[in-house]
């Protein structure tokens, strides 16, 4: 059997579409190489040397064809018994390979490997042998000496192929992360997993020349970036061109040795790292954008304070937290008296300006831990974690006094009549839900308005314990 000469430079071959990059990686070796799967050793990928050896031009014709098709029936049991974990020293076997109607002696060595997805793969290397007894024995001895490293190298190429395939899929693997903390945890575990196999993976936040550790697979997160080729620092560049996150990692020493010996593989690996950094940066940017959009959906567009949607969700959370931590929870419901007259006399634009000013006024009078929300129209609700009924009463009385002394819209509101506040306040008690707490404060508010406005009404516990 004759073999035509292979191209002198692999860079002259065009990069084939997926899944052909696996074959191009195998083409780096002049000897025939095979990647197969299953008990029948069905072909997944072969290199050009194997295709020339069996006289096939189209790689697609070989897909899922059993390797035993080319092995003499007397030797097939030896092929199927050849194995190992790919790390021990495999002993080559001699088999007869189909050559048209004839057979040719070849030395075959191989090992079993599990892919990152847990699928069984077999990697084989073939060596054509001379038919003279002395030459054959000599070649077999030489093959035994080189077999271990040959199979290891083949398996590393297969592993690198899987890595190239896996890098663009990172975005799909990160779908569903809820926040940045989960993003860094999941991305770090994926980069450290068997599929990608990087070491010392860590994420850093950059502020000027200072960096702060966000997540790391080891305790310190520090790697020696001066250690040479094995260390990488990859900036995660956002769409604005800003770099405030950096990924640091190290390449496995055995893989690095293979990359040094094959410049084309080194070039591809650098592209893989670039793809990883780009995918992570885009995913992080999308996560931030989603968080911003979600936050905007919970804000009142006019006043900038939280809206009713935020109120309903946060109130239930605070009820759960209050019961869990055995801490009081208060609620204040307020409404502007005279707001309709402002709209009628000064116009709706001035009415909007008044609502904005009132929201700022209320923000100034409550703690950061309180939750101020615009319920709708000229109504506002304040959730007050940790506040007892007495605390809320004192705050409400101070608020009424401050409101009476404040000159809104630089005094223009006086043209429309008196502007004041009515308030209803209450506190969480045993068995109450957030909705019931809100409804109770709302009823107290309207009692204050019916009683003459510019006042507050306190919901009395009526014998119930103020706290759960």
Image: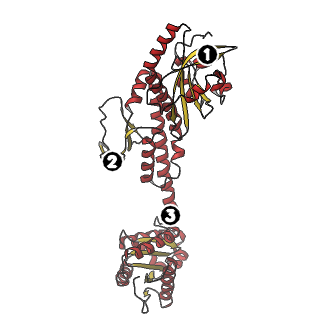
Residue 199 visible? The answer is: yes
Query: Along the polypeptide, which appears first: circle 2 or circle 1?
Result: 1
Q: Is residue 69 above or below residue 368?
A: above
Give the numbered dot on residue 33.
none
The CA distance from mark 3 to mark 2 is: 31 Å
What element does badge 1 sit on?
helix
The crowd level at tag 3 (other Cα within 10 Å; few <14, some 14-19, many 20+) is: some
Residue 412 is drawn in which quadrant? bottom left
Are dots 1 and 3 in contact, CB under 8 Å?
Answer: no
Q: Nearer the viewer, residue 210 or 43?
A: 43
What element does badge 3 sit on?
loop
Residue 402 is drawn in which quadrant? bottom left
The crowd level at tag 2 (other Cα within 10 Å; few <14, some 14-19, many 20+) is: some
Residue 110 at what x, y percent from top left?
52, 26
Residue drawn 42% across the image and 70% down it:
371
Residue 411 visible? The answer is: no
Q: Nearer the viewer, residue 120 or 138?
A: 138
Residue beneath disc 1: 53
Are dots 3 and 2 in contact, CB under 8 Å?
Answer: no
Residue beneath disc 3: 298
The quadrant of the picture occupied by the N terminus is: top right
| Label 3 vs label 2, nearer the camera | 2
Residue 140 at what x, y percent from top left?
48, 15
Residue drawn 31% across the image and 38% down it:
223
| Label 2 vs label 1, nearer the camera | 1
Q: Is residue 203 above or below residue 464?
A: above
Give the numbered dot on residue 213.
2
The quadrant of the picture occupied by the C terminus is: bottom left
Q: Nearer the viewer, residue 265 or 204?
A: 265
């Amino acid at each position: 059997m004759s073999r035509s000469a292979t191209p002198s430079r692999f860079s002259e071959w065009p990069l084939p579409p997926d899944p052909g990059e696996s074959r191009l990686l195998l083409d780096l070796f002049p000897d025939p190489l095979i990647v197969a799967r299953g008990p029948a050793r069905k072909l997944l990928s072969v290199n050009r040397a194997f295709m020339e050896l069996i006289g096939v031009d189209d790689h697609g014709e070989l897909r899922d064809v059993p390797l035993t098709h080319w092995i003499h029936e007397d030797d097939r049991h030896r092929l199927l018994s050849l194995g190992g974990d790919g790390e021990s020293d495999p002993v080559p076997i001699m088999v007869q390979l189909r050559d048209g109607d004839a057979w040719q002696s070849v030395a075959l060595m191989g090992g079993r490997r599990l892919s990152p997805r847990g699928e069984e793969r077999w990697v084989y290397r073939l060596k054509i042998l001379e038919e003279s007894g002395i030459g054959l024995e000599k070649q077999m001895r030489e093959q035994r000496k080189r077999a271990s490293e040959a199979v290891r190298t083949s398996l590393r190429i297969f592993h690198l192929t899987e890595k190239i395939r896996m890098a663009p899929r990172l975005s799909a693997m990160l779908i569903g992360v809820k926040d940045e903390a989960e993003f860094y945890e999941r991305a770090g575990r994926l980069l450290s997993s068997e599929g990608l196999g990087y070491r010392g993976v860590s994420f850093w936040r950059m502020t000027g020349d200072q960096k702060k550790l966000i997540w790391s697979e080891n305790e310190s997160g520090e790697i020696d970036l001066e250690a040479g080729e094995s260390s990488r620092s990859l900036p995660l560049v956002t769409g604005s061109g800003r770099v405030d996150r950096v990924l640091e990692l190290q390449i496995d020493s055995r893989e690095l040795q293979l990359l040094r010996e094959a410049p084309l593989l080194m070039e591809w690996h650098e592209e893989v790292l670039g793809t990883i950094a780009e995918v992570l940066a885009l995913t992080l940017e999308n996560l931030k954008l989603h968080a911003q959009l979600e936050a905007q959906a919970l804000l009142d567009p006019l006043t900038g304070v939280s809206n009713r949607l935020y109120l309903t969700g946060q109130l239930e959370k605070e009820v759960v937290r209050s019961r869990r931590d055995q801490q009081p929870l208060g609620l204040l419901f307020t409404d502007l008296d005279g707001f309709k007259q402002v709209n009628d006399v000064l116009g709706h634009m001035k009415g909007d300006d008044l609502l904005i000013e009132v929201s700022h006024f209320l923000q100034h009078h409550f703690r950061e831990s309180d939750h101020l929300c615009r319920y709708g129209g000229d109504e506002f609700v304040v959730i007050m974690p940790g506040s007892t009924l007495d605390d809320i009463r004192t705050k409400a009385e101070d608020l009424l006094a401050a409101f009476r002394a404040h000159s809104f819209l630089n005094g223009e509101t006086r043209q429309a009549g008196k502007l004041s506040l009515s308030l209803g306040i209450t506190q969480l008690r045993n068995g109450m839900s957030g909705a019931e707490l809100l409804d109770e404060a709302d009823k107290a508010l309207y009692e204050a308005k019916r009683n003459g406005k510019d006042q507050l009404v306190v919901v009395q516990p009526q014998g119930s314990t103020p706290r759960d």
